[in-house]
Amino acid sequence: MTETPGHCDREGTHCRIAPDGVLLCDVQPTELGVRRAMQGLMGHLGGACDDDAWRARVEIAVTESLNNIVEHAFADGGMPMARRLIRIRCDTARDVIRIEIEDNGCPLPGGKLPAGLAADLDVPVEDLPEGGFGWVLIRSLANTICYCRTSGWNQLKMVFEEHPTAPNQ
Amino acid sequence: MSLTSSITDETQVVTVNADRIDAALAIRFKDDMRTETEDGPSRVILDLSAVDFVDSSGLGAIVAAMKQLGSGRSLDLAGLSPTVEKVFRLTRMDSVFDLYPSLDDALAGIAD
C-alpha cells in the first residue's frame, strides 16, 4: 500500500484507502485514538475537497460521534479493550461526503438518536452546562443522520452536502 | 503545561500552546487553567490563536475555566479559528463569552 495523507497506522488506529477511494479507519476506542483517527480522516478530506467550512462540519460532527462512543457506548467497562471496535467509512463524491461509523458498544438510550436540544444558557454562571453539546453539534452540522442497531452493532450514517440549505451551518 | 501566562496592568493573558482542545486534553487544560488563574487580575483573556479545533469536551473545559474564576472576574476569548467559532456559535456559547478576533483586539477592547 502506498503512503497517502489519509493513511496512518499508529498505536491501534489504522486508516487505509480502499481501491474504490473509500477511506476505512479502525479506531482505537480511546480519546487519543479518536484524535489519531480524525488526523487520518481530515488528511484524507484535505486532498478530496477544498472547502474549509465543509471539512470543518465533518470534523466537528465526526469527532463528537466518536467521543460519544468512547465515553458512553463503552462506558460500562465490561468489555475488554481489545474487543471494543470502532470503524469509520468515508465516501467522498463531488458535492457530498458520506460517513458511516460502526461500533460494538451499548446501544443509544431508547434505541434512537438523542434529541440534541440546546441547553438553557439564561442561567447564573455557576449553573452553565459543561457538557451535553455533542448531539446539538451533530444535528446542526449533518444534513441527514440515520442510526440503527443490528446484531450487536451501532451504525450511524451521516451525510454532509457541500452546499447546505439549513441556515445555521 | 498546555498554557503560558503573562500579566499586564489589570489583565492576565493566558495563551494555549496546543492546536486542539479535545477530549484527550480537556481535563489537563481545565487543571492548568485553575493553576494559572488561581489569583490575579479580574480580567483574563484566553488567547486561542494557536488552536485550530475545539470539541464539546474542550468547550466544556473552557466553560469550567470561567466558572473557576468566581464572581467578579471575567474570561474573554481571543483569536478563534473559523472552526472554533462555529462550535461556540452552534452551541450559543458565543452569547456567554466576549469574543475578539485577535489578542490585540481583546487588549484594545474591540469586540468581534
Image: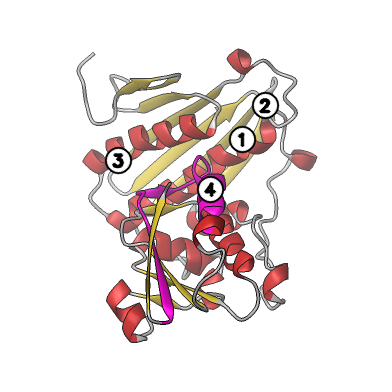
Q: Check if residue B18 falls in the magenta segment.
A: yes
Work out how far the residue at label 1 is from the one at label 3, CA to CA, in angstroms: 22 Å
For the residues beneath circles 2 and 4, the answer to whether they share a chain is no
Instruction: Identify the secondary structure beneath mark 1.
Output: helix
Residue A120 can be seen in this image: no
For the residues beneath circles 2 and 1, the answer to whether they share a chain is yes
Work out how far the residue at label 4 is from the one at label 1, CA to CA, in angstroms: 17 Å
Task: State which tag comes first along the sequence, 2 or 3.
Answer: 3
Q: Residues within 10 Å of mark 4 (few under 14, many from 20)?
A: many
Give residue A70's quadrant in the image. top right
Give residue A38's quadrant in the image. top left
Identity of the residue drawn at 67% across and 26% down: A105
Tags 4 and 3 in contact by the CB under 8 Å rule? Answer: no
Identity of the residue drawn at 63% across and 67% down: B67
Tags 2 and 1 in contact by the CB under 8 Å rule? Answer: yes
Tags 1 and 3 in contact by the CB under 8 Å rule? Answer: no
Tags 2 and 3 in contact by the CB under 8 Å rule? Answer: no
Q: Amino acid at mark 3?
A: Leu
Work out how far the residue at label 4 is from the one at label 3, CA to CA, in angstroms: 25 Å
Write down the residue under mark 1: A69
Q: Amino acid at mark 2?
A: Gly
Write down the residue under mark 2: A105
Identity of the residue drawn at 41% across and 60% down: B84
Q: Over which residues does the magenta segment extend? A: B10-33
Work out how far the residue at label 2 is from the one at label 4, CA to CA, in angstroms: 23 Å
